Image (cartoon, helix red, strand yellow):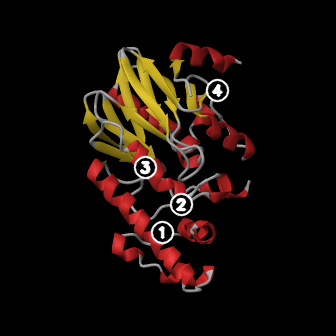
Amino acid sequence: MPRTTVSIRACVAIIAAGGLWLAMTQQPPQQPLTVEKLADDLHIIVGSGGNVAVLTTDDGVVLVDDKFNRNVPEILEKVKSITAQPIRSVVNTHHHGDHTGGNETLIRSAGIVAHDNVYTNMMNNKQPGPPHVTFSDKASVRIGGKEIRAHYFGRGHTNGDSVILFPNHRVVHMGDLFVSGVPFIDYANGGSAMAWTDTIQKALQLDFERVIPGHGPILTRKDLIQWNESFKKMRQQVSDLKRQGKSKDEVGGLLKLEEFGWKPSPLWGRSVPGLYDEVR
């Protein structure tokens, strides 16, 4: 598919013009946001929702993800503590409300960029702030002489997860394709346990060393490789238990997640029935 180059000024010009998502947007207690520095011009904002990457340039700021809408005032405050430049663009890694909720406010002054399926999922789920610029394969967002590259490698957490590369820093933002712990496979929005590991394998072809996960601390390429291998082993456990005649209800309790340092979560519980059906 052809590469799409997204003009930030064009994005800004365009501005003038169920149930699972509700679960994903049940907002936990407010946590204070903090800023971590990766480079002079690259920071992350953590706390209350997904990790937000902040790329600063002399011509404006690019965010990757924007947490919940309630977090926007504090996000703006944190950005102002880094630079006086305004936010020109937001790139969403996927459609879940803890990564796109801030679109509702930021879309008034910034261009929103995301994969085609993010737009579709947000429209289907009646989420505010769907992107005005979308891509199918890859896109470049260029501003102030700097570039962010968004890549779509296939299904995983959802059917619209993008891997965002900061080429000058050898850093990627993986969104929820990579988290510090157990994965959530959103089958209602096109997620796939079978495709997920292949999607990460394709992402590993990019040139990077540090990884911004969807949630949790900054990790490394080696951590991502290890997590992907753990995912394969977990999937094999499900396959083995299914072959032994274990039911969906039994499998959830028999998986040995502690082998990978993972702990079950409510969203993991939502993943197990679809995972059981999908594995060979």
Query: Cα distance, mark 4 to mark 1?
Result: 36 Å
As drawn, the label of residue 132 is 4
- The reply to whether discs 1 and 2 touch (Cβ–Cβ < 8 Å) is yes
- At label 3, the amino acid type is Ile
Of badges 4 and 1, the one in the foreground is: 1
As drawn, the label of residue 193 is 2
Query: Cα distance, mark 4 to mark 3?
Result: 27 Å
Under circle 4, the secondary element is loop
Earlier residue among tags 2 and 3: 2
Quadrant in which the C terminus is drawn? bottom right
Under circle 1, the secondary element is helix
- At label 4, the amino acid type is His
Earlier residue among tags 1 and 3: 3
Query: Cα distance, mark 2 to mark 4?
Result: 29 Å
Under circle 2, the secondary element is helix
As drawn, the label of residue 235 is 1
